[in-house]
Amino acid sequence: MSGLRLAGALWIMAGVTCAGLLSFVLIGERLNDLGALLANLALPARVLGGALVAFLIGSLLLTRPGPNVVRWSSLVGVAWLIAFGPLVVTAVAAALGGSEVGPVISSSLITSLGIAGAVVGYWSRMAARRLK
């Protein structure tokens, strides 16, 4: 059961990281020119959706842990890798080209926290199954 709590905490941390990135970086840095933010809504929408989903999965793992929630966590983990994994690759490629390192850190943190939450939840459920 403590493994599912850890998985829930990791998902909540992923949600907090997404919300912070959206609030302070994507919106905060463009506060004077929100038109630039509205011109390219793909990244803010992805980060907002990630925050909402991460908070939902994390809170479900903390309050109602069970096989269905772990299954949803695993499915969201795969979708999380598909949604945020390319951001890491793009940020690393840009950093190798001489760009900032900040996007590498934030995208890597978001991606790794979500994947870790899914993996810890899955492993915890498999360990509980073996004990029965």
Image (cartoon, rainbow, N blue to C red):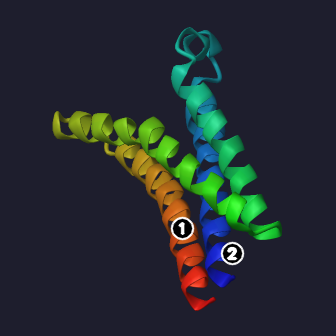
Report x, y in % for residue 117.
Answer: 55, 63
Look at 49% across and 65% down and name the residue there.
119
Report x, y in % for residue 64.
Answer: 81, 66
Q: What residue type is labelled 2?
A: Arg
Look at 47% across and 36% down and name the residue there.
83
What is the secondary structure assignment of the residue under circle 2?
helix
Query: In the image shown, does 15 or 127 lie closer to the viewer?
Result: 127
Look at 83% across and 68% down and name the residue there.
63
Query: In the image shown, does 125 or 62 lie closer to the viewer?
Result: 125
In this picture, is 46 found above or below 112?
above
Q: Is residue 99 left or right of residue 64?
A: left
Report x, y in % for residue 70.
Answer: 64, 62
The residue beneath circle 2 is 5
Q: Which amino acid does label 1 sit on?
A: Tyr
Q: Which of marks 1 and 2 is nearer the N terminus?
A: 2
What is the secondary structure assignment of the residue under circle 1?
helix
Identify the image quadrant of residue 88.
top left
Query: Can you say which quadrant of the picture contains the N terminus?
Result: bottom right
Q: In this view, does 59 lie to the left or right of 51?
A: right
Query: Can you say which quadrant of the picture contains the C terminus?
Result: bottom right
Q: How crowded is mark 1: few (under 14 residues within 10 Å), some or many (20 or more)?
A: many
Report the residue that reaches farthest toward the front: 132
In this picture, is 81 found above or below 47?
below
Residue 12 is marked as none
The residue beneath circle 1 is 122
